[in-house]
Image (cartoon, rainbow, N blue to C red):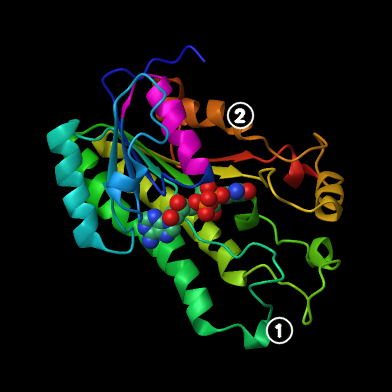
Amino acid sequence: MGIDLTGEVAVVTGASGRLGTLWVQVLSGAGAAVAALDLTGAEELAGSADSGLGRVLRLTADVTDRGSLRDALAETTEQLGSPTVLVNNAGVDQPPSTEQGSWLFEDLPDDLSAAVLAVNVLGVLKVCQVFGADMAARGRGSVINIGSLYGNVAPDPRMYAHLPLDPPFLKPPAYGASKAGVSALTRYLATLWGPRGVRVNTLSPGGVQGGQDSTFLEQYTARVPLGRMAQLTDLAGPLLFLASGLSSYVTGHELLVDGGFVSW
Ligand SMILES: NC(=O)c1ccc[n+]([C@@H]2O[C@H](COP(=O)([O-])OP(=O)(O)OC[C@H]3O[C@@H](n4cnc5c(N)ncnc54)[C@H](O)[C@@H]3O)[C@@H](O)[C@H]2O)c1
């Protein structure tokens, strides 16, 4: 991509997931040192995605636990230096599957909705309270909150109607609400920290291809002007843009990377 992040210290939450692995590779590949945070033990993860130029430090941290985030900040600062880029990527969703069961909207368990909001919204808030505030205290940084297409449009239940589930599969309503909440937090923090040199933006991917059944794929891609789901490589450039000085006058923005889905 030709973007040089040498000297930057990036923090990625949910770093061992699908997109998290990509963010770590992309940032490290551009020369940034990366603290890769996830729930899973650091030793177990060591070396799994360290193919880039910058050093990758694997740390165990739960975004719902501010104490563990404070520990991770201390370890990051000691080993890599003070963070200058933060990717709030950790998130939970319920993928369409026949194994996890399904509910009528009115019967959705409270704990399912609460778990989504605890990680996707309060988790972003807590990570910003720890890592973002550290950047603001130092007067420089770029925060990228990972949102979703479904923070902007409702999922279409007809895309899941072919699944053999009774009642039919519903994407958790808390998921879209959580991602709309992420965009609201982005705007809040962009105004709070603008005067302190920290930019805050949302990167909202559309559906990323991988593991979906052929009926879903056909119906989803028919709704996308570019005629396909996102590939991981489609997301790399947008992340580097928001992480680097290329976006030096961009803050409070939501960058949708959805193949044009919302234009239709
Ligand atoms: N995959 C997609 O199509 C897609 C589309 C739009 C947005 N997103 C968003 O991208 C982000 C990453 O999604 P993904 O597809 O890579 O999911 P994933 O399930 O592969 O990865 C999520 C990661 O977050 C971690 N995590 C969960 N709870 C955590 C916690 N409390 N503390 C720390 N880490 C925690 C998990 O261990 C996992 O490694 C999410 O915020 C998701 O909502 C994904």
Residue ID at (64%, 50%): 149
Which is nearer the eye, 38 or 108? 38
Where residue 86 sits, quadrant-wise, is top left
Which is nearer the eye, 142 or 56? 56
User: Of callouts 2 and 1, which one flags the residue occurring earlier in the amino acid sequence?
Assistant: 1
Where residue 105 sits, quadrant-wise, is bottom right
Q: Is residue 175 left or right of residue 104?
A: left
Vertically, is 247 above or below 97? above
**Which stretch did the figure color magenta?**
19-33
Residue 72: x percent and y percent? 21, 48
Residue 184: x percent and y percent? 47, 56
Residue matched to label 2: 233
Residue 40: x percent and y percent? 35, 54
> Mark 1 is on which residue type?
Leu
**Residue 256 on the magenta segment:** no
> Mark 2 is on which residue type?
Thr
Please tell me the numbered disc located at residue 104.
Answer: 1
Which is nearer the eye, 246 or 160? 160
Confirm if mark 2 falls within 8 A of ligand 1. no
